[in-house]
Image: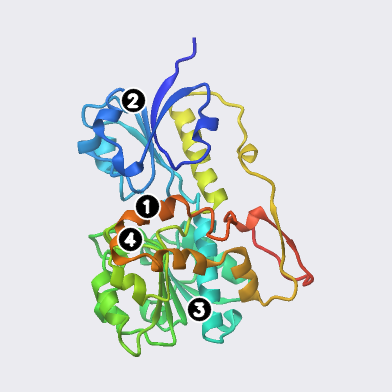
Amino acid sequence: MIKKYKIVADENMPSIGTLFFGIADIIYANGRDITKEMLSNADALLCRSITQVNASLLNNSSIQFVGTATIGIDHLDTHWLNAKKISWSNAAGCNAPAVGQYVLSAISYWSLKNNRSIQDLNVGIIGAGNVGTILAQYLDFYGIDYKLYDPPLQQQGDSRDFADFQSILKCDVVSLHVPITAEGEHATRYMFAIKTLEQLNSDQLLINASRGAVINNQDLDDYLTRDNAAQCVLDVFENEPNINPSLVQNTLLATPHIAGHTLEGKLRGSWMIYQAFCRHFAIETDKQESELYPASNELDLSGLSLEKRLLAIYDISLDSKSLKNLKKEEIKIEFDQLRTNATQLPNGVIRRDYSGWCIKDDCSNFLLPK
């Protein structure tokens, strides 16, 4: 008789029921409300970044495997998990395409607002991991100049051409794609505090789609009120969901930590965690990832500029309006709900990766990088 496992899973991970059908009983919960009592007799925990996984949650539980459907792992106490011989896995790269595409939409929106051509810009990418790399590939595809900054990778022998920090700060667009680290030579916590922010100017755009504390949020809020301040797009904040309402209003665009929330990104994350679970418990499966994805959406982009085409695929301003239109006292309550619903935009369109679109277009040289 095949053993049936017990899993506690975040309720906002798609297709978990389909993937684990027949091999596990699943208890679903809000990621912020998962308790040690829920996990006392469970074999596995499947979570996202809003669940802090550490000794206080898992001590004396029967958990053997933790899977997070995210790129980042700063919500996992990996040292403790390793010491307790609890296997863990993340979904590295699962939503990197979505975040890269989010950044392209943000740049397109800013370019149109400022009457600039996106293809005349240069973009400074801080962090050349999964997201930074795919963003660079997109920029290269569209003929947009960029520079990379990632001292840790450079020191490890990465052969790509890296720029220095001051060169990055001179770029038209500065986009942050780093993990949060508090110690070491290249710590990223408060990498952008007031002294660094003051080196930017009103002709520039700063984007943070990495972790909220990479920028000192109070410094940024104060800085953005200045006449010569750069414009800013934020997808991440300190102390989510209890974020600074003033900062939300002072940005060009503010979204509720949804840069990676495409249909494909979420499904890919679930698939990667399913695979890791099966490897850990030595479960054979004949399921195929391709079975998870619906047919491509069709879209006619005839006659549109590159900026408008990219915004037609994902209009970032819709997600921003949903957050900015909230009253101050509503933000903490509604932040997670906006994240939950983010794959479906306010106009009813399901947000897809570029790979989920079939473009009808009269311009033969306009393609979408897959």
Residue under label 3, please give it. 110
The residue closer to the viewer here, 171 or 148, is 171
Residue type beneath disc 2: Ala
Callout 4 amino acid? Ile
Numbered disc 3: secondary structure: helix
Tell me the SS state at disc 2: loop
Residue 286: percent from left, percent from top: 61, 27
Q: Amino acid at mark 1?
A: Asp
Q: At 30% across and 40% down in the image, what residue appears?
A: 33
Is residue 273 left or right of 57 when viewed as pictured? Answer: right
Foreground residue, 352 or 201? 352
Q: Dot 4, how many residues are within 10 Å of its Cα: few (below 14), some (14-19), or many (20+)?
A: many
- Identify the mark at residue 331; answer none if there is no mark: 4
Q: CA separation, marks 4 and 2?
A: 34 Å
Task: Give the Cα distance between marks 4 and 3.
Answer: 24 Å
Outermost top residue: 1
Crowd rating for badge 3 (residues with CA inside 10 Å; few <14, some 14–19, many 20+): many
Look at mark 1 in the image and give the residue it sits on: 336
